[in-house]
Image (cartoon, rainbow, N blue to C red):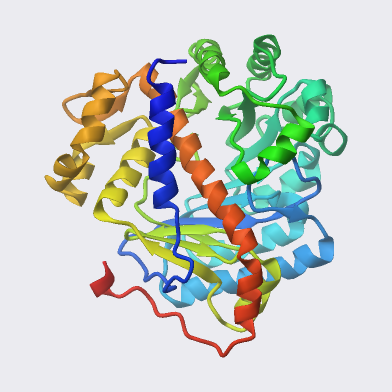
């Protein structure tokens, strides 16, 4: 690993944990519509199998509960339209959004009827790569299908408890081959640095991806919240963070010919038009709204989280109440750091964007981070933008991983907070005020 990585990670862990810490008794607020259209994130928390390494908000799929959830979800989506929000792009994640494809299609039809949507991206699992599902998703204009594969190695798939529900590596390859060309972008999600994963195993996965010639591949380092660490170690074994850099070098070497980097961990085939190369982690808009249980929103410097209790979510929304359970205003420095993280994850941060949004304040407040990144060789300052170097791409993988680890720890806290939310449901209803200008 690079010499600076241990200290780098220690600082990141502290800073991101502070940024994602919500007060135990917060003054919860609702966002106001921003001036420009923003991204809509839709969370579907149901999975047919719960992977031991996953820290995302998900529950075991039950069709009746999922159908009821989708109905309430559409009610929440309508409420944002009634309040004047405008959305241009949609990303549907989970969980597994395609567990009830008919409900997903009805939800996307509603969204398209309310707003002029440009792009729609949907996550799925290999067992849902079927012609009937493809046909339904194409009717609502899904342009990017992102498939959670994680590995083609059968031993690793068994350890991850994915072999039985989602198929062998060979079966997954057949399904991906059938899915090629159906949508403008077929993305495959992979995980690197799994316990018991050798470089030889990973290089075989890379060779398989190159043979499949999928449109896009996203490589995620193993990210597990401390709260899920024990279960992961029991089923998969101990991970070795020191190996991450070796795995990432294998990715860069394998992808540099036929693929170009769309972000620090996403690679798109060079013959795919840039307009089709959507990566859900590049947020070109300044704001996004998350709907569904356990979804996050970020609007004008405020972070919001909806309730992680699916029952509480259904009760609140069905009664016309907000699903938001936590809110927090970022400090000016936290807003700049968040922008710095997300924009540069897409490989460049234009100076024009910084001037319009922050003026000179960005350079005054952020100079320690800017200087540190230049000194270790992570960034270069070109005439028009700050850009990542190859080493900087690895640094940003670490930064995003620590950010998501902090988010995962918050998810764990929120799951513990469910009891308090259910208790508060029995109390007299208190209206949640919107964020007003004086709180900006």
Q: Is residue 143 above or below residue 3?
A: below
**Taking the image as drawn, is residue 282 in sight?**
no
**Taking the image as drawn, is residue 250 in sight?**
yes
Q: Is residue 67 above or below residue 375?
A: below
Q: Is residue 201 above or below residue 281?
A: above
- For this rendering, which residue is in front, 175 or 379? 379
Q: Residue at x 38, y 43 (%)?
A: 15
Is residue 93 shown left or right of residue 245? right
Instruction: Indicate the position of residue 334 as horizontal and vertical percent values.
Output: 31, 50
Is residue 432 shown left or right of residue 193? left
Q: Residue at x 76, y 47 (%)?
A: 133
Q: Residue at x 33, y 57 (%)?
A: 330
- For this rendering, which residue is in front, 72 or 432? 432
Q: Residue at x 67, y 25 (%)?
A: 194
Instruction: Indicate the position of residue 4 as horizontal and vertical percent values.
Output: 37, 20
Residue lying furthest bottom: 428
Residue lying furthest right: 164
Please give the count of numbered marks on the rendered protein: 0
In terms of image quadrants, where is residue 420? Answer: bottom right
* Rendered-image quadrant of the C terminus: bottom left
Instruction: Indicate the position of residue 225 as horizontal and vertical percent values.
Output: 60, 42
In terms of image quadrants, where is residue 394? Answer: top left
Instruction: Indicate the position of residue 237 as horizontal and vertical percent values.
Output: 73, 27
């Amino acid at each position: 690993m690079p010499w600076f990585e241990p200290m780098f990670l220690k600082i990141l862990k502290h800073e991101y944990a502070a940024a994602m810490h919500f007060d135990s008794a917060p003054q919860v607020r609702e966002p106001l519509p921003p001036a420009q259209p923003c991204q809509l994130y839709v969370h579907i928390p149901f999975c047919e199998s719960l992977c031991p390494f996953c820290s995302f908000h998900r529950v075991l799929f039950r069709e009746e509960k999922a159908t009821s959830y989708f109905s309430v979800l559409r009610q929440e989506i309508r409420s944002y339209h009634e309040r004047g929000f405008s959305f241009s792009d949609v990303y549907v994640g989970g969980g597994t959004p395609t567990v009830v494809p008919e409900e997903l299609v009805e939800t996307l039809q509603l969204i398209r009827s309310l707003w002029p949507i440009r792009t729609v991206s949907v996550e799925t699992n290999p067992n849902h790569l079927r012609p009937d599902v493809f046909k339904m998703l194409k009717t609502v204009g899904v342009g990017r299908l992102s498939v959670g594969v994680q590995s083609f190695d059968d031993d690793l798939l068994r350890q991850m408890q994915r072999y039985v529900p989602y198929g062998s590596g060979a079966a997954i390859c057949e399904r991906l081959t059938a899915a090629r060309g159906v949508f403008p972008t077929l993305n495959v999600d992979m995980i690197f640095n799994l316990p018991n994963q050798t470089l030889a195993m990973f290089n075989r996965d890379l060779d398989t991806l190159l043979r499949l010639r999928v449109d896009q591949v996203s490589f995620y380092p193993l990210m597990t919240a401390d709260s899920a660490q024990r279960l992961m170690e029991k089923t998969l074994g101990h991970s070795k963070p020191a190996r991450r850099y070796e795995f990432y070098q294998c990715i860069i070497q394998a992808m540099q010919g036929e693929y170009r980097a769309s972000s620090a961990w996403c690679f798109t085939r060079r013959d795919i038009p840039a307009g089709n190369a959507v990566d859900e982690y590049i947020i070109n808009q300044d704001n996004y709204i998350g709907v569904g249980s356990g979804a996050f929103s970020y609007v004008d410097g405020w972070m919001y989280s909806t309730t992680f209790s699916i029952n509480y979510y259904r009760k609140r929304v069905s009664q016309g109440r907000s699903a938001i359970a936590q809110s927090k205003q970022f400090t000016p420095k936290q807003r700049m750091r968040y922008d710095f993280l997300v924009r540069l994850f897409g490989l460049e941060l234009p100076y024009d964007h910084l001037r319009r949004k922050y003026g000179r304040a960005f350079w005054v407040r952020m100079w320690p981070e800017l200087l540190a990144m230049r000194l270790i060789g992570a960034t270069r300052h070109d005439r028009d933008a700050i850009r990542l170097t190859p080493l900087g791409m690895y640094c940003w993988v670490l930064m995003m991983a620590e950010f998501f680890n902090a988010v995962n720890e918050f998810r764990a806290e929120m799951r513990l907070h469910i009891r308090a939310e259910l208790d508060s449901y029995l109390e007299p209803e208190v209206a949640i005020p919107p964020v007003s200008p004086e709180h900006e």
